[in-house]
Image (spheres, rainbow, N blue to C red):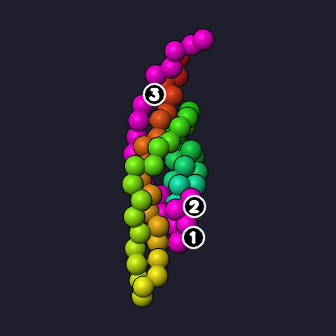
Amino acid sequence: MTNHVYKQIELTGSSTQSSDDAIRVALEKASKTLRNLHWFEVIGTRGQVEDGKIAHWQVTLKVGLRIDD
C-alpha cells in the first residue's frame, strides 16, 4: 500500500437552497481547477437572514488534496 501525502485548503461555498448544496457548489467549483480532491470536513456553517428567512447558506470546508507521487 502506498503512503499518501495531502495538502489542506479551505473553501467556503454558498447557496440559496441548503447547506448541502453550498458544500456541493464549493467542491464542484474547486474540482474544475484542482486535482486529486480526496476528502472534506465541514468546519463552519453560517447563513444570511433576510426578512426572518434564510437567504443564503455559507459552509466553510477543509479539503484534502492528495499530492501526486
**Element type at marker 1?**
loop
Q: Real-space Cα distance between discs 2 and 3?
A: 25 Å
Q: Looking at the figure, which quarter contains the N terminus?
A: top right
Number of numbered callouts drawn: 3
For disc 1, the neighbor class at 10 Å (few under 14, some 14 to 19, many from 20) is few
Q: Real-space Cα distance between discs 2 and 1?
A: 6 Å
| Circle 2/circle 1 CB separation < 8 Å | yes
Q: Real-space Cα distance between discs 1 and 3?
A: 31 Å
**Element type at marker 2?**
helix
**Quarter residue 37 falls in:** top right
**Residue 24 percent coordinates (x, y):** 58, 55
Q: Which mark is residue 6?
A: 3
Viewer-proximal residue among 64 and 34? 64
| Circle 1/circle 3 CB separation < 8 Å | no
Q: Is residue 34 magenta?
A: no
For disc 2, the neighbor class at 10 Å (few under 14, some 14 to 19, many from 20) is some
Earlier in the chain: of badge 1 and badge 3, it is: 3
Viewer-proximal residue among 67 and 40? 40
As displayed, is residue 3 above or below residue 42? Answer: above
Q: Residue furthest front?
A: 52
Give the magenta part as a residue range.
Answer: 1-20
Amino acid type at circle 2 is Asp
Amino acid type at circle 1 is Gln
Q: Which mark is residue 17?
A: 1
Q: Which mark is residue 21?
A: 2
**Element type at marker 3?**
strand
**Quarter residue 17 falls in:** bottom right
